[in-house]
Amino acid sequence: MAEVPPVSFNQARERAIESLSTYFAQDELSLEELERRIERAYQAKTIADLDELTADLRARAPAAASVAAEPSMAPSMVVERDRMVAIMSESKRHGVWSVPQELDVLSLMSDATIDLTQARLPAGIIDLHIRAIWTSLKIILPPGLPIANRMHTLMSSVTNEVDEAPFVPGAPVIRLSGWAAMAEVKVLVRRREE
């Protein structure tokens, strides 16, 4: 019988973050507590440190912890970081594509669209770091994804037009950060059928 290879520290950290995201989606954690614990996950030095992050949650809600959501991407398909640059142009990411854990977006005097409705999403937090200048940027989400919008603005419009669909258990969290100057950044929800 083949031996099961030991879990690497990075795999253990990704599993811990995925578990925390599941607890957040099940209203077991606030957004602030989720972010605090994910920050601790990245500061952890041992697998025992990672286990401590969910120990109280497992003890409090054993039934919820045993329900594991299927990951939307195999670990080998996860892209850690990518960049999207649009300068005086039109740029779209749509259809089936692999979303990185961190996407840096620079859009200058452009029309840009990031459509996640059919994309393969990694578990945990997906960071979209935006720098938008004289730009129209649309971010289109499927229903049920939690979003944390931490954008800064200067003479800009940044809006979330999300619906009231309940969060999908185990869904990744979309975290927007960065800034917009004389730009329009719009977050929309669209079902795949649309």
Image (spheres, rainbow, N blue to C red):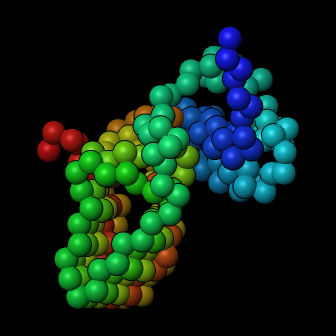
Query: In the image, 61: left or right of 172?
Result: right
Above or below, 85 relative to 56 = below
Query: In the image, 25: left or right of 30?
Result: left
* Residue at the image point whose x is 45% and y is 66% from the top: 82
Q: Which residue sits furthest top?
A: 1
Looking at the picture, how far across and down is residue 118, in whole percent? Answer: 27, 45
Q: Nearer the viewer, residue 8 or 112?
A: 8
Above or below, 114 relative to 153 = above
Above or below, 173 relative to 80 = above
Counting the numbered discs, the total is 0
Q: Nearer the viewer, residue 140 or 31?
A: 140
Above or below, 138 relative to 182 = above
Looking at the picture, how far across and down is residue 108, in whole percent? Answer: 31, 87
Query: In the image, 159: left or right of 178?
Result: left
* Residue at the image point whose x is 32% and y is 48% from the top: 119
- Quadrant of the rendered image containing residue 68: top right
Q: Nearer the viewer, residue 34 or 39?
A: 39
Q: Which residue sits furthest left?
A: 194
Q: Which residue sits furthest front?
A: 1
Query: In the image, 136: left or right of 23?
Result: left
- Quadrant of the rendered image containing residue 107: bottom left
Is the C terminus in the top left, top right, bottom left or bottom right quadrant?
Answer: top left
In this rendering, does residue 33 appear at all? no
Looking at the picture, how far across and down is residue 16, in whole percent? Answer: 68, 39
Q: Nearer the viewer, residue 187 or 42?
A: 42
